[in-house]
Amino acid sequence: MNIKLITFSLISFLNISVNAQKSALWNEFVDAKKNGTEAVLPDFSFAGYKYSEVEIPSVNYKIFDVTKFGAKPNDTKSDKEAIRKAIAAAIKNKEGIVFFPKGKYYINTSKDDIKPILIKASHIVFRGEGAGENGSVLFFEKDLPPTDPKKLYSCPSAIQTSAGGSDNLLTEVTANAKRETFKISVKDASKIKKGDWVILKVVNNSKDLIRYDTQPLTVEKEWETIRNKGVQVNERHQVAHVKGNTITFKEPIRFDIQKRHQWKIYSFAHSEGLGFENIRFEGNWMKKFKHHRSAQDDGGWSILKVSRAVNSWVKDCTFKNVSNALGFSQSAYSTALNIQIEGNIGHSSVHAGGGSTGILLANIIDKAGMHHAAGVGGGSTCATVIYKATYPAHTSFESHASQPRCTLFDNVEGGFFAGRAGGARKNLPNHGRYLVLWNYKETDVAEKDFRFVATDSWYWRIVPPIIVGFHGSETTFKKDEVQVLESLGTPVTPKSLFEEQLKLRLGKLPEWIKK
């Protein structure tokens, strides 16, 4: 295994004058695709619902109107049980639209239980008649308490998705494979077929693997998780085809595989085709936010958690006065599109975490300025794309430790500083290999020689990222703490890396993006 960082010498090659526009790193990616060689940049074009190749559908399933199950908008009485009944009826039908006519629906009132609303099925869509104040409003009156009073972060999300079954060991990987390729060799592929969703997994604390994953950072003794349990990867893939004991995935592998590290393939228990659209989610979080002060601050009004879902979506929704708006966990190739955060500042806006793969967070407009803006969480989340997100200057992107890797911030606008990444010290670093900032526009004050390895704090540690077209303020970076630095102070073309990679892969840009 070549454990050298992908060369700091690339910096001088890729440093172009402030007047230049065309990205040399992009040209290198195109050439690598033509020649079948390994590019510096990951291919992020597979992120999102059905790999972003098609528009999120407007499904025409049978409608289950919550008002037909006892919900009465605008009367201040709880509609929680009526919503559950509508979900149950849709699940019994094997698919359905849980429909919310215009009005305000009360959830988690003083008379309600403290359990989340759970959707444990596929092809269930929550649909409203608009995310504005006069649209379909789901109002969460009371907060949900933490499941463990000693853990402020353990407040459950009010609405959750899940799936039946468990992830079971299927076979072992028997040969090396390079990142950004599609094929792996396994011991026995007899239990795997075309169309299956699987998890490519490793948990290994070999010193060479830890060094490969974290270099040139110094692994500190307090980083207990990676030192003791080791490097953890949970890439979620769909099988394109199987030939003998060779499996081809539909999406690229994101990590260099060495067979000696004991990689394995697991089944992936999941739901599919879940949707939330045209709804306004309102909490009752009205206090001035203080990080880690209380369970209410950190998560009392956590609203929506999409777990164990593939090809699913949340679109055209607004979240107001909430602690945590929306998170993806243990999910794959799903999209959050046209999401707006309003009202009081809370803990977190929209993120991909829990070992999710290929999540697209697109057009995330955080007007509230949540403590943690759009970003990634742990569980070795990878191949996340944050595309056209905006947030105020007083906040910055999230990278919440526990081994997130391979993340693209593409045409993001907002604050940029070290203080808003999260995660426990034992779970550092905050972000692993292949963090890419592409045409990031900074709106807060500039910093000289910005550090990705903090000297005044224990919590800010990021494996050297790729930075292209960073502009807005006049922030500079320490060149020994970045992998590639190109066109600092001036945006580059292509304007959007995600769009251009998708266009290159498909031959044209899909209509949904053009819209």
Image: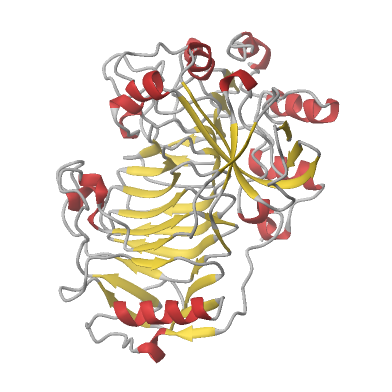
Rendering coords of residue 384 (x, y %): 54, 41
All told, the count of numbered labels is: 0
Along the line of sight, the residue nearer the viewer: 138 or 3: 3
Is residue 258 visible to us here?
A: no
Along the line of sight, the residue nearer the viewer: 362 or 242: 242
Residue located 64% across and 11% down the image: 2
Which image quadrant is residue 24 in? Answer: top right
Vertical placement of 483 versus 293: above or below? above
Q: In this view, does 6 lie to the left or right of 305?
A: right
Rendering coords of residue 89 (x, y %): 46, 82
Q: Return the residue found at the far right.
A: 35
Q: Is residue 24 left or right of residue 220?
A: right
Vertical placement of 435 versus 258: above or below? below
Rendering coords of residue 26 (x, y %): 71, 29
Q: Is residue 369 left or right of residue 53?
A: left
Q: Is residue 247 left or right of residue 461?
A: right
The C terminus is located in which quarter? bottom right
The way the protein has been coloured in the rendering is: secondary structure
Rendering coords of residue 170 (x, y %): 61, 41
Residue located 51% across and 20% down the image: 213
Is residue 403 visible to us here?
A: yes
The N terminus is located in which quarter? top right
Residue located 21% across and 41% down the image: 291
